[in-house]
Image (spheres, rainbow, N blue to C red):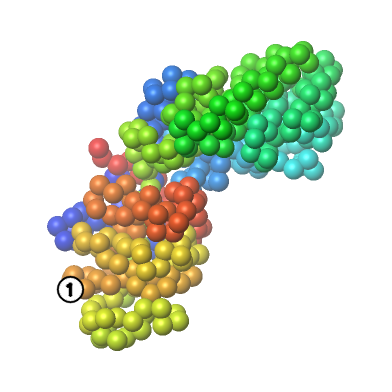
Amino acid sequence: MRTDLLHRRAGGQRTTVVSRPTALVDLAALRANARTITRLTGTPLLAVVKADGYGHGAVALARAALAGGASALGVTSVTEAVALRRAGIDVPVLSWLNAPATDFRPALHARVDLAVPSLDHLEAIRAAVRRTGVTATIHLHVDIGMSRDGAGQDSWGRLCTEARTAEEAREVVVHGLMGHLGCADRPGHPTTTRDLDRFDRATRVAHAAGLRPTVRHLGGTPAALTDPRARLDLCRVGAGLVGIDPARTGAPLRPALTLLAPVVAVREARAGQRVGYGDAHVLPRATRLALLPVGYADGIPRIASGRASVLLHGRRCPVVGLVSMDQVVVDVGALPVVAGDTAVVLGPGAGGEPTTHEWARWAGTIEHEIVTGIGPRVDRRHVEEDH
């Protein structure tokens, strides 16, 4: 870990001291995960760094993934893509979720690849090409069953034909075909086979229109790790880079984020005393309570009230009472906790702290929501952990 962080011993363990809620992001873990995924799939890796790199920092995740073997990057919006360029990152970047009214000129000037899910998008990009004189590199996006982004089967043929017309006019280069699998986190699910068949049919339609894309890509993290059929020419992986394994494959991925919070106050509490809003928790015994300055505005799910815990002095301590917007209360019992100590709210789990997977279970959600929900008041520090 970086030497400019302060440490002290608490309960026999080395603890990072923080004065405000802080997320430590392990760059070594990010690089290692990219290497692991590239090795396991044997396929070029497009590192997905959307949503500020799944809450880990988009630029930091991008650089770590590239150092670990990724060859391209993916984001949702043009804004996210242009920000990577402004950070000095000069590899292929694909943006795939924009409204037709988007101003695509900054993307063209920044040499950002654009996904095209509809005729309206194609026409908007062609208009931007005419205004800038810059040819667009595009990936035609087909909906293969999720009823979400991508052209439906009824419009796919015309989209391919119009894209070919734009290509002949030297307005675009159709570099890729893309779609997305809805059930890849359940290996062997029959829907995946049907979706793969739909994508193959969509590819044949594109070829019949005269298109010859260089790459085809479908698979996110679960498909990349579990189904060789879905890897095609490129794997689009985001969650796996930060250590999330949605299909629970057992792949040796390292969670990269540790969320810390300082203890701002400790108080003695008697049996029968209320904790927090709404009489939701009444203490069954006398104890000591520690206050942490994190709440649902910082990504602590309110629905996890009454189930969650944090690590203090090497011991799990339950969160008591309802999670508030800015704070939680923790029952520390007889532990010698004092103001200024640091609680590990979540982390990789090696030291006994709660993991992102546990928080997701307590909140009835997925790990992706936990890490991307960590709010802007939480300080992010990118560190190199010692392994």
Relative to 346, is 335 above or below?
Answer: below
Q: Position of residue 311 (x, y in %)?
A: 27, 60
Relative to 362, is 77 above or below?
Answer: above
Q: Is residue 384 visible?
A: yes
Look at mark 1 in the image and give the residue it sits on.
334
Q: Tag count in the figure?
A: 1
Relative to 138, is 27 above or below?
Answer: below
Residue at screen point 36% across, 53% down: 358
Q: Position of residue 291 (x, y in %)?
A: 34, 73
Q: Is residue 66 left or right of residue 203?
A: left
Q: Position of residue 301 (x, y in %)?
A: 46, 62
Q: Nearer the viewer, residue 214 or 22?
A: 214
Q: Is residue 379 left or right of residue 333?
A: right
Residue at screen point 79% across, 43% down: 101
Residue at screen point 55% across, 26% down: 193
Badge 1 amino acid: Ala
Q: In terms of image quadrants, where is residue 192?
A: top right
